[in-house]
Amino acid sequence: MPTLDPSQIRVAATGAFWKAPAGIAAPTDSTTAYSASWTHLGYATNGFTVTQNLKTQAVTGWQSTEPLLLINQSLDRKINVESLESDKQNLSLAWGQGTITQTGIAAGGAVTFTTNTITTTTPHGYVAGNWVYFPNITGTPGVLANVNYYVLSAPTTTTLTLAAIQNGTQIVIAAGSSTGVINAQPFTMAIPDSAIGVEFALGIDWSHGGYTNRLIMPRVQLLSLPAIKFVRDDAVRYPLEIQVLKPLDGSQSVLPYGSDWAASS
């Protein structure tokens, strides 16, 4: 009777999807952080599916009705994920690798930075959670020109506080000025007529307890464009079907990494 061990059962309890331009260097284990060239695709509905389709041809002989040999004809791997966040990366993928451009709208007139205070010359109209940037900066007030920040609060109609991430820690402000504060949220997208040939790299992480796993696919491409539902009673979802391609250097197309005793027992 074989030994049965329920501690070797695994669940993809949580995880993450990452995207980068094709050819970008990737981690070579399951725990090293991705470089800044990789973008996190955010929340997903419930894991992912790997579909592996191996096509073979059977060789039979006169003396046997059973196959004598199987010849491998093709091996096809696909990844299906369903993203939930309507961010730049997911919107671009969902529309065939569309190019999104911010079309910013100025508000509030000129800006003065004083100690922990950002003041506009006219009412700015912003509320907490808005995304803004400053087209230019004089002095060193603690924020950078043309970098997006979140409005943390709007104490008055002409003052703001900022954070680097939504609902994050307030940025400490020093003296400086700018010609304006721009609403970074408006955008336009150029949708290509065809997504053919637009390749990228894909990374998938998942874990169960302290056990970690990672798949790196250096070269992938959208296999199809998703059907997206925009309805009142559910979140907008982006179901992505991704084809794994052979890397141009002939290396392995799927690179699995892990930190799990069960896989080597």
Image (cartoon, helix red, strand yellow):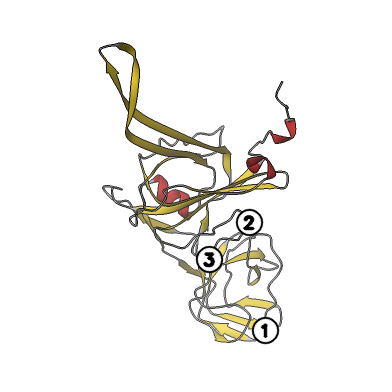
Q: Which mark is residue 227?
A: none
Look at the image and tell me whether residue 243 can be seen. yes
Horizontal arrangement in the rendering, residue 148 relative to residue 1 (left or right): left
Q: Earlier in the sequence, mark 1 or mark 2?
A: 2
Q: CA distance from mark 1 to mark 2?
A: 38 Å
**Badge 1 amino acid:** Ala
Residue position marked by numbered label 2 in the rendering: 31
Q: For mark 1, what is the residue? A: 174
Instruction: Evaluate whether residue 238 shows in this view.
Output: no
- The first of marks 3 and 2 along the sequence is 2
Q: Distance from label 1 to label 3 (Cα)?
A: 28 Å
Task: Say which element carries label 1.
Answer: loop
Up/down of 112 relative to 204, above or below: below
Q: Residue at x 63, y 83 (%)?
A: 141
Q: Residue at x 63, y 72 (%)?
A: 158
In this view, 22 is above or below 220: below
Q: Tell me if 242 is positioned left or right of 35 in this view.
A: left
**Total number of numbered discs in the rendering:** 3
Q: Which amino acid lies under the numbered mark 3 shown in the image of this protein?
A: Ala
Q: Are marks 1 and 2 in contact (CB under 8 Å)?
A: no
Residue 142 appears at what percent x and percent y? 63, 80
> In the depicted view, which residue is nearer to us: 180 or 13?
13
Label 3 belongs to which residue?
36
x%, y% of residue 74?
32, 35
Give the x, y percent position of residue 27.
54, 59
